[in-house]
Image (cartoon, grey):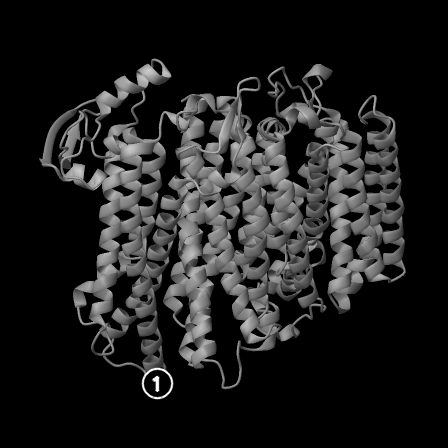
Amino acid sequence: MHLSDLWFIAIAVLWAGYFVLEGFDFGVGILLPVLGRGDAGRRVMINAIGPVWDGNEVWLLTAGGATFAAFPFWYASMFSAFYLPLLIVLVALILRGVAFEFRGKRESARWRFRWDAALFLGSLIPAILWGVAFGNVLRGIPLNAAHNYTGNFFTLLNGYALLGGLATVTLFTLHGAVFLALKTTGDLRRRAAGLAWRIGVAAVLAGGGFLAWTEAAHRAPGHGGSTGAASVALAALAAVSLVGGVLASRAGREGLSFAGTAIAIVATTGALFTALYPRVLPSTVAPGYDLTVANAASAGQTLALMTVVAAIFLPLVLAYQGWTYWVFRKRIIAPPPAEAPAADRSVASS
Amino acid sequence: MNVLELSRWQFGITTVYHFLFVPITIGMAFLVAGFEAAWLRTGHERWLRLTKFYGTLFLINFALGVVTGIVQEFQFGMNWSEYSRYVGNIFGAPLAIEALLAFFLESTFLGLWIFGWDKLPARLHNACMWTVAVGTTLSAYFILVANSWMQHPVGYTYNAHKHIDELSNFLAVLFNPAQLAGFPHVIAGCFLTAGALVTGVAMWHLMRARGEKDGDGSTRTADIAAFRSAVKAGGITALAGAVVTIATGDIQGKLFTTRYQPMKMASAEALYHTAKPAPFSLLTIGTLNGSKPVFQITLPRLLSFLATGNWDATVRGIDNLQAHYSQVYGPGSYIPVVPVVYWSFRLMIGVGLLAALIALISLWSIRRGALPRYRWLAWPVIALPLLPLAANSFGWIMTETGRQPWLVYGQLKTSAGVSANSAGEVLASMIVLTLLYGVLAVIESGLLLKYIKAGLPAEPEPGEAGGPAETAALVY
């Protein structure tokens, strides 16, 4: 195996880590207007992800940086091709990021309502657009001989990619609901579990449909052998663990259901990357214009350096992030109702 | 404007904006960690109250630093894709390492610090903030490795077949001489910035207390004692930062004048013709495009000394360098916009020195007596936190515009690095980001002022570390 193959796997791992971790952050944000009753209820939800959301988001930055270092041609073509969608994602992530810190800094109900809206939209939009982006990567985009994008914004809005967006947003929302059931108590815990069942059905349909479409139509041609079989196997694992996670939630097994949705997200990401391999960004203009693991990668010296750095520091990151989750392992307990300011009631009902 | 101009403006706006928050984050992380350590060591409540007070300001600032940083990482690929292809082998590595080594540390341990007041032992809690501080410094190191390589490329080989630069020696990139001079300069600037903020805010409270003749008893006395400690800690930090900034700035100036980028330094000094010895420009007014001087006041020989350490040395001038570069790199202009480089250089130094001076007077003013002695200090201390922010911005504007027309010095011109996107797309993103950043600046300033005015948090009950457990569990 070439180092460039190893780095293709590493980037798949980073995206999988990002989707598993930020996935439930996005889910919690999306469910904020649905499950958050009153200021106190919404605060419980936000604080359930409060200590970890920022660390979770670094998985995205590491995936981006690693793509830049290991596959400069992939990074350059993909980021310039998805210019406007990425701008929208950036605006969403900016609003969401400051919302966490700013929301509680003033007492005004209107102030908090606005930041809650920012948190909601800032979670919803990237949750959709990451799926749309991955759909377009799998499907291929019009790239010319110089690997520059020749389509426009609307080229990216095709049925397959939009189904990808539906798949990620339902998966992440389900993951968030399951996470809330695991991390909260009382009424919120009960309602989150109840909602997980209904979102679960949508996630199974959208996620299953997207994976089936991928395996049927958008797997790398000529690589039907080992990676093709692996992709199908991972898609099947995703489907089984997703259904299992939903059923476990129904049965009140909260830890098991969270493990199920987490494995489903990892397996889905794995299925997509194995279906993509050995391409990294196919061209719909001509197969010769495809960006591949081979022609997009950095030279050996850079990849060797990055391998050493990642081998040392990625386990360290996993260790201390894991420790953080252990420190904050207890369920979040809602403050007594008297804590909620009276002025907030009107916002809760609107 | 074309794609190139729009992309340059967008990168300039977003980068200068991002770097308003970065130095505060880096310097304040150390100061807040230091305040908490002082509380653990002495047991004095005032250090805990300062930790919480400045910790809140730190967090409000940190939020914007983080979110604007994401834009920075993305726009290399979005707006500068030709550049990304050309340099990714080398430039991408420190960026990836920055995320893996530094961003994870900062964000994870800051989460632990914010939410861990009642969950972690006190010393471990403090260690979390020290870890954040180390993380921010590592982050600065790696991003400056990337920038230093653009200023002075080392440790690479050119692959003519693929028309890209490839890594040949990472240690050379990591310990680039431009980096070894630039990194301490930037970090010292961060300490000047954060020290000035801590001092300015504390002095403002002391000046306000001075205005109100009668305090309301013991709380007021306790507050004054706490803010006096903050003025001392912040003032000494700011002055130490200023001294190191000046020393490392001098080293950088010599390095770039004599070896790496003589054109940048010649522009910064508005030295048009090679001179031996070279005079220092006190004031140069040139034509609008900076092509030649119209009026100059100079001090003889001083520039030779500043640039080389020798009163008689030759310093190369803009016109002579232009002729030289045309021969080496082919026809074209190799001159940056001289007035921008010249004035941003002078403003960086002047504004930075002014901040150090105000910090020094602030320290002097509380030497005797509980409250500052000079009434006229009221306005200067309000300006104090803002001056280093301006100096930082001028410094980056000077060094980045001074490198033009190069994106990677001697290797790749800025015009060759831009993406093939449409001008409409880049115009849209520039407008959206500028408007968003503007709105957030207003909100951020409002919040900072609110928490600055609110003053120190109430003194905790004896035996209680961080207030009621509920507020500690639901921070946001």
Q: Crowding at label 1, few (<14), some or many (≥20) Cα neighbours within 10 Å?
A: few
How many tags in the picture?
1
The residue carrying mark 1 is: B218
Tell me which chain the residue with mark 1 is part of: B
On the question of residue B282 being in view, the answer is no
The residue under the point 61% across, 18% down is A150
Q: Is residue A305 left or right of residue A30?
A: left
Asked if A287 appears above or below A211 in the picture, the reply is above
| Quadrant position of residue A83 | top right
Identify the image quadrant of residue A77: top right
- A2, above or below A269, in the image: above
Which SS class for mark 1? helix
- Image coordinates of residue A254 in percent, x first then y, are 82, 61
Q: Residue at x 69, y 37 (%)?
A: A7
Residue in view at x 62 percent, y 75 percent? A338
Q: Can residue A219 be spotted in the picture? A: yes
Give the image location of residue A248, x and y in percent: 88, 57
Q: Amino acid at mark 1?
A: Ser
Give whichever of A301, B190 is nearer the camera.
Answer: A301
Q: From what the image shows, is residue A196 above or below residue B268? A: below
Q: Quadrant of the N terminus of chain A?
A: top right
